[in-house]
Image (cartoon, rainbow, N blue to C red):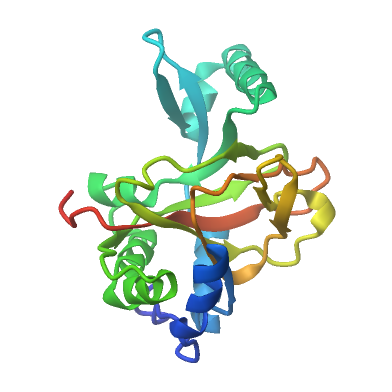
């Protein structure tokens, strides 16, 4: 990717212009965050060149939770019946307002573990942890201590969802959550909305997936991704993560 397009924040954006909205609402949406050629290149990378894993929670015999990350080969080797049973368990937990089911490429894990050597997704991971992008985040959220950005690419296909929750770790190292929308021509009726809730669990705000839009918000606000409709015409592509201030080597 580096030989084809320069990864950069839109040079016409002043992050200080968005800081007051974040300070007031703990939520800000920034359109056209990347130069057009950058956004186009990342979109094509997600849509055409990633090996997605299916991600969902599973309880362990010890009462703790395991995050299942299954490749297509894993799913095929498991067999239809075994996979159906696991999906039934996911749906049962979701009835109690806990769970998630979507496709992902865990960018930080892949980078550290040496998955897919030479793949251009690793250049995106490096860019999200570059001084340019981290300084942009620092300026918007007013946190000079940011040291890194966690990241995963996500694809919500038909039936995928993320139930309402707050992000753990905010009082430890996560200063703000972010999402980078890379979805074109999404219809509101297709679901997949980033939704926020008030104290009565009424919807306070909800956002349709957009293209080249950076959302930054306080992860302690209750939020979800509504289920993607069975008639959605495409997938919902995003990069999501957190601006963090834990040690760079941690």
Q: Is residue 49 visible?
A: no
Q: Is residue 187 visible?
A: yes
Quarter of the image with the N terminus in it: bottom left
Residue 85 relative to residue 113: left or right: right
**Residue plotted at (59% across, 64% down):** 182
**Residue plotted at (60% across, 22% down):** 90
Depth order, front residue of 94/173: 173
Residue 207 relative to residue 169: left or right: right
Farthest top residue? 61
Depth order, front residue of 212/29: 29
Residue 14 relative to residue 246: left or right: right
**Residue plotted at (52% across, 30% down):** 56
Farthest left residue? 249
Estimate the x, y position of residue 87 in percent, counting from the top left.
62, 21
Estimate the x, y position of residue 188 in percent, counting from the top left.
81, 57
238 shown above or below 43:
above
Depth order, front residue of 101/119: 101
**Residue plotted at (74% across, 48% down):** 203
- How many dots with numbers? 0
Estimate the x, y position of residue 157 in percent, counting from the top left.
67, 44
The quadrant in which residue 61 appears is top left
70 shown above or below 115:
above
100 shown above or below 76:
below
């Amino acid at each position: 990717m580096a030989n084809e397009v320069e990864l950069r924040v839109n040079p016409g954006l002043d992050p200080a212009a968005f800081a007051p909205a974040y300070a007031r609402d703990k939520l800000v949406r920034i359109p056209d965050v990347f130069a057009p050629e950058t956004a186009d290149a990342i979109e094509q990378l997600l849509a055409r060149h990633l090996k997605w894993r299916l991600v969902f929670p599973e309880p362990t015999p010890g009462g703790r939770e395991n995050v299942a990350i299954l490749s297509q080969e894993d799913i095929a080797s498991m067999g239809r019946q075994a996979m159906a049973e696991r999906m039934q368990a996911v749906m049962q937990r979701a009835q109690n307002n806990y769970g998630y089911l979507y496709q992902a490429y865990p960018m930080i894990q892949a980078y550290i573990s040496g998955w897919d050597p030479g793949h251009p997704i690793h250049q995106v991971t490096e860019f999200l942890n570059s001084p340019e992008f981290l300084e942009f985040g620092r300026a918007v959220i007013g946190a000079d201590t940011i040291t890194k950005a966690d990241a995963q690419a996500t694809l919500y296909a038909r039936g995928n969802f993320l139930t309402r929750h707050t992000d753990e770790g905010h009082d430890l190292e996560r200063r703000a959550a972010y999402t980078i929308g890379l979805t074109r021509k999404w219809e509101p009726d297709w679901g997949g909305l980033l939704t926020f809730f008030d104290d009565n669990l009424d919807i306070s705000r909800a956002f349709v997936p957009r293209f080249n839009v950076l959302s930054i918000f306080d992860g302690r606000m209750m939020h979800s991704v509504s289920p993607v409709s069975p008639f959605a015409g495409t997938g919902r592509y995003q990069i999501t993560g957190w601006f963090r201030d834990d040690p760079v080597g941690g």
